[in-house]
Amino acid sequence: MLREGIMGRFGRSPFGPTQNHMELVLRCVELLEPLSEAVCAGDQQRVETLAAEISDRENDADLTKHEIRNHLPKARFLPIDRRDLLEIVHLQDSIADSLEETCHLLTLKPLTMPEALRTRSDNSPRKSRARA
């Protein structure tokens, strides 16, 4: 009984759900390059498809963020300060939120990418490594 009392003071680790949230945000970010390519190619239908997918993924990340916030104990001992953990989750979430907002802007009106920027995006470091 004493063991349960002591162990009850410690909440379950918040790092698993936080890691899951990070992976969901990464799933959003992984679509940034195909989105950029679609914008450069002037493929508005693809831009809208990717924007919808990013929005769905961002929504999944938001659900996880809310779950973390709602289930994070206030009166128990945690291996990290509660405010610090919430700040980490907030920073992660702001990445997905910014990407979703950018997608929304890109779907409002087709964007014509200037040739100079298209050429610059063709020489991105990721593409350069792929060609090497």
Image (cartoon, helix red, strand yellow):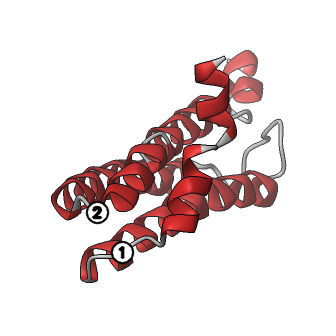
Q: Secondary structure at mark 2?
A: loop
Q: Which mark is residue 42?
A: 2
- Residue at 83% x, 36% y is 79
Relative to 111, 101 lies left or right: right
Q: Position of residue 6 (x, y in %)?
A: 77, 27
Q: Which mark is residue 25?
A: none
Q: Nearer the viewer, residue 78 or 56?
A: 56
- Residue at 57% x, 66% y is 116
Q: CA distance from mark 2 to mark 1?
A: 6 Å
Looking at the rendered structure, the kind of residue marked 2 is Gly
Relative to 42, 89 lies left or right: right
Q: Position of residue 23 (x, y in %)?
A: 53, 34
Q: Position of residue 76 (x, y in %)?
A: 73, 45
Looking at the rendered structure, the kind of residue marked 1 is Thr
Q: Position of residue 121 (x, y in %)?
A: 57, 52
Callouts 2 and 1 close, C-beta under 8 Å: yes
